[in-house]
Amino acid sequence: MDLRLFPLQTVLFPGMRLPIHVFEERYRLMIRECIEEDAPFGVLLIKSGSEAGPPAVPHDVGTTARILQVEYLEDGRMNIFTVGERRFRTIALNTTQPYLRGEVAYVDQRPPSDGSRALVARTEPVFGEYFRTFLAIGDQWSNSVPLPSDPAEAADFVAVHQYNLIFNKHVIGLAKPGATLLLNAPYGPDEVWDQLPASVQQAIVDKGIDLWVIDAFAVAVNKVLPGSADVRRGDYHIVLRKP
C-alpha cells in the first residue's frame, strides 16, 4: 500500500490523539491532499535528522494518522488534530516527491497469551490510581479507569499517557500564552528541564508557561499499598515559573 509519510520526533500509538502544526510547504501540500482525498498519512519516529529542513531518516515501523480537525492559519499554515489508527511497517521509501512516501504493509497484532492477559490485570489497578491522581491535581475525578480487555489495546492506552510526549513541540504549540502545564515524569524539576530539547524550552519560555512536574506513577503505587495517603501539594514541584 502506498502511503504519505510524516517523520516526527514522537511515536504515534493507535488510539492516541496527536496535534501537529504544519508549516513547511511540502507538508502543507501533503496534508491538503490527505484532506481532499479523506486519506490517512503515516507518522514515523525520526531515527536521524530533524522535523524541519533536509529530509530525515525515519524508523521502519509507524502508525497511520487520521485527520479529525483542521485549523487554517495565515500564509497557508495549519493546525491539525489527528488520531492514530493502524501500525504499519515500511517496505520501501519513495523520495521522488516533495514529501516522503512509502510502500507499507499493516502489522497485525499477535493473539494475546495468558501471560499478557495476566499483565493487564496487574497493571489496571496501578494505572487507575495513577490516572485518578493526575486528574485530581486538575480538580477532576473518575470513579474507575478500566483498561481495554485486549492486551495490545491496553498497552497502547497506557503508552499514550507517558512523559515523552512533552518532547513534541506540537503539543506545546497548542498551549495558550501564560498557561499552566502539569507534566507527569519520574524525574525532579532540574532533570526534567535539562532533558527538554532546546526548541521545547524556548517555546515554553516564549509563551510564559508555568511548568510543573509530578511523579504520578510513584504516588499511584503508594496509594495502592497499605498505609498510603492522598495526593499532597508537596508531591508536585515547579520546574519553570513565568516572571
Image (tube, helix red, strand yellow):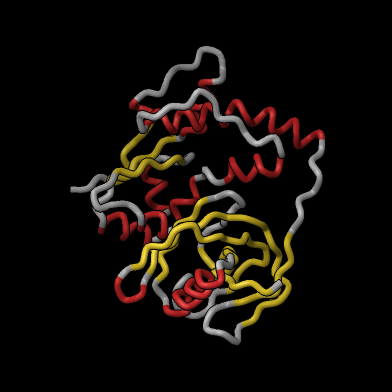
Q: Can the viewer see residue 49 in this picture?
A: no
Residue 201 or residue 119, whichever sits in front: 119
Q: Can the viewer see residue 78 in this picture?
A: yes
Q: Please, is residue 212 above or below residue 14 in the view?
A: above
In the rendered structure, the answer to whether residue 41 lies left or right of residue 235 reads right
Asked which quadrant contains residue 125, the reply is top right
Q: Please, is residue 46 above or below residue 174 in the view?
A: below
Q: Position of residue 106 (x, y in %)?
A: 73, 62
Q: Quadrant of the N terminus?
A: bottom right
In the rendered structure, the answer to whether residue 27 lies left or right of residue 236 reads right
Q: Position of residue 37 (x, y in %)?
A: 56, 71
In the rendered structure, the answer to whether residue 77 lies left or right of residue 10 reads left
Residue 62 or residue 227, whichever sits in front: 62
Q: Residue furthest top?
A: 227
Q: Position of residue 115 (x, y in %)?
A: 79, 34
Q: Please, is residue 221 above or below residue 55 in the view?
A: above
Residue at the location (55% across, 13% down)? 226
Residue at the location (51% across, 62% down)? 9
Residue 169 or residue 48, whichever sits in front: 169
Residue at the location (45% across, 55% down)? 167
Q: Position of residue 151 (x, y in %)?
A: 71, 39
**Count of marks placed on residues:** 0
Q: Residue furthest left?
A: 243
Residue at the location (48% across, 39% down)? 186
